[in-house]
Image (tube, coloured by chain):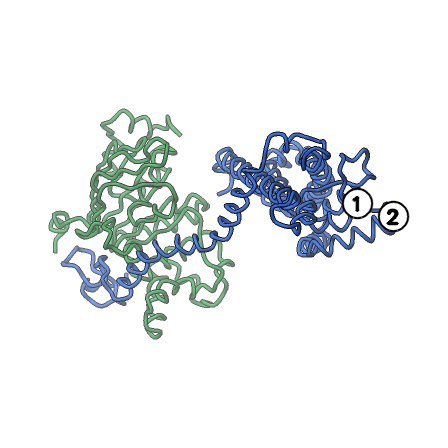
Chain colours: A green, B blue
Amino acid sequence: MSAGAAESSPPVVSVQQLVVTAKKKQPILRGISLDFPARSLTAVVGPSGCGKTTFVRSLNRMVELTPGLKVEGVVNYLGQNIYDPRVNPVLVRRRIGMVFQRPTVFPMSVFENAAFGLRLIHEAEDEIDAAVEEALQRAGLWDEVRDDLNRPALALSGGQQQRLCIARALAVRPRVLLMDEPTSALDPAATQRVEATMQRLKEEIVIVLVTHNVGQAARVSDRTAFLHSGHLVELGPTADILERPRDPLTQQFITGRFE
Amino acid sequence: MVPTPSADAPLGTPIAAPVPALAAQDVLFDRSARTTWRLGFDRWAGWLLPLLFLVAILPILDLVWYISKTAIPTLTWEILTSFNYRTVDALGVPIVSTVEVLALSTAFAVLLGVFGGIATAEFLSDRSAGWVRVSANMLAGTPSVVLGYFGFFTFCIYAGWGYVMMAGVLTLAFFMTPYIFRIADLAYTSIPRPIREAAYGSGTRPHQYIVKVATPIAFPQVLNGIFLAMAIGLGETAPIVLTTTGSKILPPNLFAPVTYMTALIWADFSSPSGSGGYDVALQCAFLLVVAVVGLNILVRVISARYRKRLEGLYQ
């Protein structure tokens, strides 16, 4: 299948008129519509409090774990609205994985961390070894941990822990990976390695990357979405957004006049 | 590079990038027997839980209903405010005495509990703090009647005070202290580490940290602990009954007999129904229920405000 055909194929995730409101407060998201095509890495940027974290969290119903938030609108995953009452949110989160701001390894061995999701889906025991290795390879961590997979995950460095979290998310083979500022707690070298991982992964899956770092968006993303106070202000190829922003708000943001 | 086989391959193979027809693992609509059963159970549980809750609180509702039904008709303004026990079964003396005893006990318990909590949370070594916490937990687990005997032997007998207000006040204070202590300890230890470090990092002395940084954060929680301890102390009978005798007048000093309302209920409830004593017991019970509910509502209100003010601090 050519790249052109992939462009025209239906999006993996399609967001339509997404509104998220908190009780007795200003709405957090005020009607966002955008599509995430296969094999894309979309950076979501915007000033603090613009709703970018809430936005990614509403793509796999993680938002429901925050009490008091109400979600309206449609988020279609391969044509199925994930907010349909007949949909099991657990299945949603297995297909749309998530990586958080701070590394969140469990106090177990590296192997058990990577195998965590596989054990949840009752993957056959003899499959797990291979799946863990594959996940660690895709996350770019394999070469560093292959010698001792039984060492405690908490003994890894911050950057390694974050890549282990990526491996844990990848192990159940999601189609979509949501990353909420995955490098904001990491040093430059670790950031560089996570970014390299992202660039490799975007050839296989859909990545939605929330970042407060315009430079990171420029380095790794194909498309950039700029959110401002709950609105999608601008969406386009990253180079266009960063070099020729159409909206004055976007321009102000990328030239560093917010935040 | 990791190979990417086709998407309709079973779970356990990497998925292909282009979006094909839905593979089994991409179907989010869950109609498995287990999920159907679970959703059905959820629906039933939605009814069942409130029902069970109702069953659980039914005895309380019944009790409050009975007390209110029998006490309210006999309760007059005169009974509530009169101190003259010769004319009616006046409640002025028990009410004021109870407030006095509770206030003094609370004062002692706050002194011990709050300062003890701060010391344990901030200044003691881990080892000593551990011992203090264990002791406080043991004290909290001690039946109030045992504590009452402790007060009786210590204050009434060894100190030679006899059955007086001070003995009751101190025994009740010992009863209330561990509740206040535990909440104060928790409030000060759970202040986020970054806040602590920010304070010390800007050159704060330990006592300045306590007064200027920690207390404003911990205060509402400590206040809650104090009110809860008061609500518990207000309902306690044994520490008072074993250390004081009743009195028809307000205690002229701390070493005189005093009437605590729960002690009055204890003494009067066995009177024949319809007699004055029985009515007094029920009236006191009603007033205590109102006071305890009031204190608990106060706690809820403070908690709600506290959550609002410190929103975002604990994450």
Given residues B69 and A168, the one toward you in this image is B69
Instruction: Give the number of the disc on residue B167.
Output: 1
Image quadrant assignment for residue A25 = top left
Q: What element carries label 1?
A: helix
Q: Can residue B200 be seen in this view?
A: yes
Neighbourhood count class around disc 1 (C-alpha, 10 Å): few under 14, some 14–19, many 20 upward? many
Q: Which residue is drawn at 53% across and 38% down?
A: B297
Q: Looking at numbered disc 1 in the image, what kind of residue is underneath it?
A: Ala
Instruction: Give the number of the disc on residue B256.
Output: none
Neighbourhood count class around disc 2 (C-alpha, 10 Å): few under 14, some 14–19, many 20 upward? few
Name the residue tied to disc 2: B159
Q: Are marks 2 and 1 in contact (CB under 8 Å)?
A: yes
**Would residue B296 appear left or right of A67 to someone viewing this image?**
right
Please give the chain letter of the residue carrying mark 2. B
Given residues B85 and B299, the one toward you in this image is B85
**Would residue B28 appear left or right of A185 to someone viewing this image?**
left
Residue A9 image position (x, y, % from top left): 13, 50
